Image (cartoon, rainbow, N blue to C red):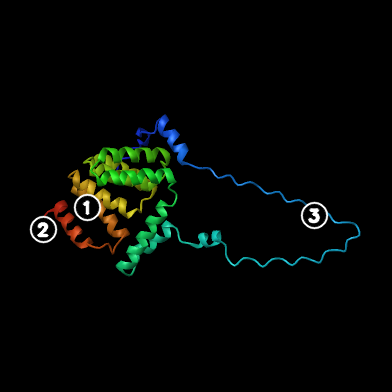
């Protein structure tokens, strides 16, 4: 299977007017530094009693966040999940982490693209996602999402190109491999579709309905055994 890399996020609609709109949507919160004046004591004042150190916090939000498993750890757990429900929950947590760095403006564009797709406005959806990638080209999930929009618009070659970028960012994105398998099938390359599907099975062994899809792809890629 050949996965082509094609980065063309700059073809979005973010022009001067859009930039003004983006600036209006983005807010910058400035936190001022509070100065602390040193206390002055009179010469005749009695010495202050020794201060007792405050008890150490048992755990801050930052400490707890540091202990939370990241995407790679959750992907390892997904591969060795003991039940379909556990696997499904792990995949949901992975997807939540993928979205955590999306800024509000980008999120708005993605939601608008999803609305466009629901209304069969595939071209508008792709342009919204082009703009999202102009803002945050380093987010793997945006390339994967635009690949879905391109596939919905019968642009399987464009979808494969976007998925190449997505998988370059994270080669263990099970959903990207699943979409790639579909895109290769649309292109009629059933051998490539089969190879992509093998990655899906490796990364998500308990995927619901996997057995039927595996058999269907096997027949299309290799034909019926004689």
Point out residue 213 in the picture as x, y percentages from the top left corner.
19, 58
Say whether disc 2 or disc 1 marks the residue closer to the N-terminus: 1
Point out residue 152 in the picture as x, y percentages from the top left corner.
23, 44
Point out residue 25 in the picture as x, y percentages from the top left corner.
45, 41
Which mark identifies residue 64? Answer: none
Q: Quote the CA–CA distance across marks 3 and 1.
A: 73 Å
Residue that numbered label 2 is attached to: 225
- Dot 2, crowdedness within 10 Å: few (<14), some or many (≥20)? few
Residue that numbered label 1 is attached to: 194
Q: Can residue 90 be seen in this view?
A: yes
Q: In this view, does 144 lie to the left or right of 33?
A: left
Specify the farthest residue to the right. 44
3 or 2: mark nearer the eye: 3
Q: In this view, does 68 lie to the left or right of 193?
A: right
What quarter of the picture does the C terminus occupy? bottom left
**Residue depicted at x 38% and y 57%:** 94
Say whether disc 3 or disc 1 marks the residue closer to the N-terminus: 3
Q: Can residue 163 be seen in this view?
A: no
Q: In this view, does 204 lie above or below 35?
A: below
Residue that numbered label 3 is attached to: 39
Q: Quote the CA–CA distance across marks 2 and 1.
A: 16 Å
Say whether disc 3 or disc 2 marks the residue closer to the N-terminus: 3
3 or 1: mark nearer the eye: 3
For mark 3, give the secondary structure: loop
- Dot 1, crowdedness within 10 Å: few (<14), some or many (≥20)? many
- Residue nearest the viewer, comparing 34 with 140: 34
């Amino acid at each position: 299977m050949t996965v082509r890399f094609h980065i063309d996020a700059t073809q979005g609609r973010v022009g001067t007017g859009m930039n003004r709109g983006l600036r209006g949507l983005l807010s910058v919160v400035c936190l001022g530094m509070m100065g602390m004046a040193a206390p002055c004591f009179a010469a005749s004042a009695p010495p202050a009693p020794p201060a007792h150190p405050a008890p150490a916090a048992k755990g801050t939000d930052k400490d707890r966040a540091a202990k939370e498993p990241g995407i790679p750890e959750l992907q390892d757990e997904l591969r060795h999940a003991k039940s379909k429900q556990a696997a499904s929950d792990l995949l949901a947590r992975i997807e939540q982490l993928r979205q955590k760095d999306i800024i509000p403006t980008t999120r708005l564009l993605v939601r608008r693209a999803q609305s466009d797709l629901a209304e069969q406005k595939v071209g508008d959806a792709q342009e919204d996602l082009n703009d999202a990638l102009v803002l945050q080209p380093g987010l793997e999930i945006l390339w994967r999402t635009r690949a879905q929009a391109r596939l919905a618009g019968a642009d399987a070659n464009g979808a494969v190109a976007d998925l190449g970028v997505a998988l370059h960012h994270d080669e263990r994105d099970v959903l990207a491999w699943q979409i790639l398998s579909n895109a290769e099938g649309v292109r009629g390359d059933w051998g490539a579709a089969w190879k992509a599907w093998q990655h899906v099975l490796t990364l998500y062994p308990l995927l619901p309905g996997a057995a039927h899809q595996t058999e269907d792809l096997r027949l299309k890629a290799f034909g019926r055994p004689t």
